[in-house]
Image: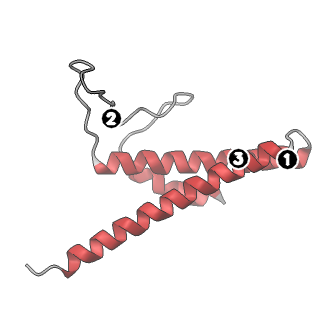
Amino acid sequence: MIDAIQSVGAFSTIRETEGAGPAPSASLVMPGAGTAAPQAGSFAEVLGNMTTDAIRSMKSAEGTSLQAIRGEANTREVVDAVMSAEQSLQTAIAIRDKVVTAYLEIARMQI
């Protein structure tokens, strides 16, 4: 089921290596912290990374659920994984809604 939406990750221009965590898209600079400047990532890269993270979270929840069915995971682990996946999905849906709303607003503008 999750593999069907993995094709959305194909829009990402950044491919992560196996076992490596997601690369930060921008570094945070504290006031007076030094000369480090934030690195700007493109909008497509940020959305691609978020999509990849959401898919990874859903796959993790699915795997934990299967472990629980086999008796290898307890209920708390399953609930934590499913709640994390649900939060990722809700965030992705909220961002999608904001992007669609912004697009529709731009489309209504007169040239």
Label 1, on which residue?
Answer: 75
Q: Which residue is mark 3?
A: 81
Q: Give the crowd class for mark 2: few <14, some 14-19, many >=20 residues within 10 Å.
A: few
Residue 25: mark = none
The amino acid on which the numbered mark 1 sits, given as a three-letter code, is Thr
Q: How many marks?
A: 3
Image disc number at residue 26: 2
Disc 2 element = loop
Relative side of 92 to 30, left or right: right
Whole-percent x and y of residue 2? 63, 56
Q: Quadrant of the N terminus?
A: bottom right
Residue 64 position, x and y percent, is 76, 44
Residue 107 horizontal/vertical position (percent): 22, 77
Residues at discs 3 and 1 in contact (Cβ within 8 Å): no
Callout 2 amino acid: Ala
Which residue sits at x=36%, y=46%? Answer: 46
Disc nearer the start of the sequence (3/1): 1
Give the Cα separation between the discs numbered 2 and 1: 36 Å
Is residue 7 positioned above or below 107 on the image? above
